[in-house]
Image: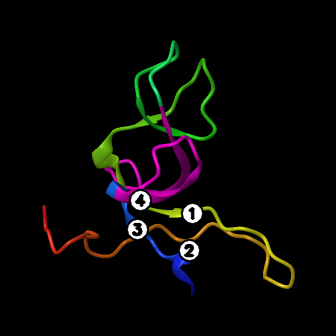
Amino acid sequence: MDLTDKWRHMSTAPRDGSRFLATVRPVEQGAADVDVVYWARSDQFGMEGWRAADSTPGAIIGYAEPELICWMPLPTPSPGREPLSIPEPYEGEEIQIDGSGI
């Protein structure tokens, strides 16, 4: 597994509108899940923040910062590689950066 196949702390996620995979925290209604998300600037359809890539102006699916655990780049297809599949949600301990537990 190369660096692009590893989950990373959300504080390092790109906020330039590019799409990537993110683990959504488990809730009472269901287990953790993986979604394709991006950072959206404030516009006439909603506030600045994380949005699901399949959102539409009439049905924006937004995520609050605490709802997303970690992220990884979208896999890129390459010849001879197995068909692309969505990885399992991250279920380990909280991902920390710089040794901080906060």
Q: Which residue is mark 1?
A: 73
Residue 23: name its quadrant: bottom left
Identify residue type, mark 1: Pro
Q: Amino acid at mark 4?
A: Ala
Name the residue tied to disc 3.
Answer: 8
- Which image quarter holds the N terminus? bottom right
Real-space CA distance between mark 2 and mark 4, rounded to the nearest whole angstrom = 24 Å
- Mark toward the viewer: 4 or 3: 3
Magenta stretch? Answer: 12-40
Do the numbered discs 2 and 4 sit on residues whose CB atoms are within 8 Å?
Answer: no
Task: Read off the residue under disc 4.
Answer: 31
Q: Is residue 82 left or right of residue 32?
A: right
Q: CA distance from mark 2 to mark 1?
A: 6 Å
Q: Amino acid at mark 2?
A: Thr
| Element under disc 4 | loop
* Residue under pointer 2: 4
- Categorize mark 2 by other alpha carbons within 10 Å: few (<14), some (14-19), many (20+): few
